[in-house]
Image (cartoon, rainbow, N blue to C red):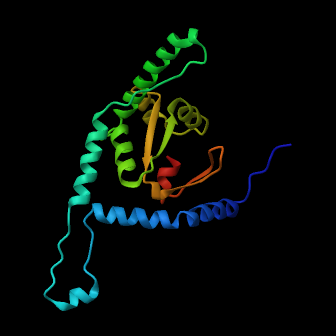
Amino acid sequence: MAKSIPELSWFQGRVAALAEDDTDRDKQIDGIDKMIKLDWDLPAELTAAGWVIAMVEMFFRQVCASAVRILSDSEPRVKVTPFKEEDKEKANAHEKVLEWFLKAASRRQRSGIVRDMSRSAVRYAEICQQVVYLPEQLKNAKKSKANTKRIEAMLRKSPFAVISYNPKSVHARYSDIGVEEVALVQEMDPHAIVD
């Protein structure tokens, strides 16, 4: 007997619960974003004084940008640990292939995967990315009789695409074992979903 899918309200309740758990974190992310965008206003009492001038310090923004440049200039090392000594050669081959996939997927983006990861890690101490396996996307698009030309063109570079998200839009619940559930909250154009 097939399992039934819960009602939409059940999913909305889970997302609301996860988002509520992240309220403090989201306030912190908003504060960090405001500091980086130099978005700061004088308190109303000081503005009313008339003689106080707002001066925004760029130090935090500059330090973040420097850290991102330093971290993203180094290439990540992919390490596969073999279970047996005789599998070492195979593990090295896997490392090379994974590094190639990472570089190929990174060429899709303007700034690159490593820079996106560095930026998110420096700003928020959290990285939220989704790895998309394009052959599976293509298979699903063909099943739904959607236009597959874009996905086929993307496949020429790499079978993977990596989508980076602001951690504020991702809510997760963890246990001792690892991630238990993840919710991505986004406003999207209905046409984008259909396409």
The answer to whether 38 is drawn above or below residue 111 in the figure is below
- Depth check, front residue: 167 or 152: 167
Q: Residue furthest left?
A: 51
Residue 139 pos. (x, y %): 58, 32
Q: Does 170 sit left or right of 54 as displayed?
A: right
Q: Residue furthest top?
A: 86
The answer to whether 17 is drawn above or below residue 138 in the figure is below
Q: Which residue is located at x 49 percent, y 42 percent?
A: 130
Which quadrant of the view contains residue 105? top left
Residue 173 pos. (x, y %): 61, 54
Q: Residue furthest front?
A: 85
The answer to whether 176 is drawn above or below residue 18 in the figure is above
Q: Does 193 sit left or right of 55 as displayed?
A: right
Q: What is the tally of numbered marks visible in this picture?
A: 0
Quadrant holding the N terminus: top right
Residue 80 pos. (x, y %): 51, 23
Q: Is residue 154 visible?
A: yes
Q: Which residue is located at x 29 percent, y 45 percent?
A: 68
Which quadrant of the view contains residue 19? bottom right
Q: Is residue 188 visible?
A: no
Q: Which residue is located at x 37 percent, y 38 percent?
A: 113
Residue 45 pos. (x, y %): 26, 89
The answer to whether 42 is drawn above or below residue 81 in the figure is below
Q: Which residue is located at x 26 percent, y 59 percent?
A: 60
